[in-house]
Amino acid sequence: DTAVSQTPKYLVTQMGNDKSIKCEQNLGHDTMYWYKQDSKKFLKIMFSYNNKELIINETVPNRFSPKSPDKAHLNLHINSLELGDSAVYFCASSQVFVGVNYGYTFGSGTRLTVV
Amino acid sequence: GIQVEQSPPDLILQEGANSTLRCNFSDSVNNLQWFHQNPWGQLINLFYIPSGTKQNGRLSATTVATERYSLLYISSSQTTDSGVYFCAVGSDYKLSFGAGTTVTVRA
């Protein structure tokens, strides 16, 4: 059973299009995240959600809009895709309990290529 | 924001060798994790270790929070240990990642 699943695994699209990436976790965690990994493998936080509430929005362009319909899901919608959006996007989840974070579980990533 | 420096950037090992990876960070943190990204891109959590020492099989980690560094030890390395090792530090809801150490284990 996959703990954190992302779909699709690969996404190739043209500039200007709108696309979505879905993420689901079955671990019962209360916090979910989106991270972006660039071509040099540098990982950077985009968003954090705790119990469906946005906690961290790390100066991400407005074209990126996360949505958390419930604790187990965190989707990422991207409008007007640009070449610079090409990257691997990772979803992750963790359990934050009384200020203690028990470690992340990452999804397998979505490789987005904008042409 | 918090700065995270990992060293060395690259490491080539012969199978069976031991190694130490280092992570320095610029501010006090309540969250420090080590991850392994395998050659297929999967990120695996190795340790949640904001302080103290932990061991898991051939891997162990030590964090000295007062001196703002953490060490990851790989003993008796195997080819399956190849990949990028990331240190990440921060708060409950935000981790800042280092640039990683790329480890290549040769048979």
Image (spheres, coloured by chain):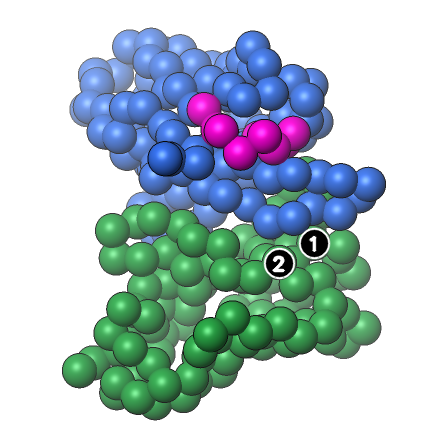
**Residue B80 picture quarter:** bottom left
Are discs 1 and 2 both within one chain?
A: yes
Give the residue at x 62% y 58%. Answer: B48
Which chain is painted in green? B
Tell me the subunit letter for badge 1.
B
The amino acid type of the residue labelled 1 equals Asn
Residue A115 is covered by the magenta coloring: no
Which residue is tagged 1? B31
Q: Colour of chain A?
A: blue
Q: Residues within 10 Å of mark 1 (few under 14, many from 20)?
A: many
Local SS, label 2: strand
Circle 1: element type: strand
Q: Quadrant of the N terminus of chain A?
A: top left
**Label 2 lies in what chain?**
B
* Disc number for residue B48: 2
Q: Nearer the viewer, residue A1 or A32?
A: A1
Q: Which residues are magenta?
A: A24-32
Check the picture and name the quadrant holding the C terminus of chain A: top left
* Residue at image point 65% right, 48% down: A102
**Is disc 1 in contact with disc 2, using a CB cutoff of under 8 Å?**
yes
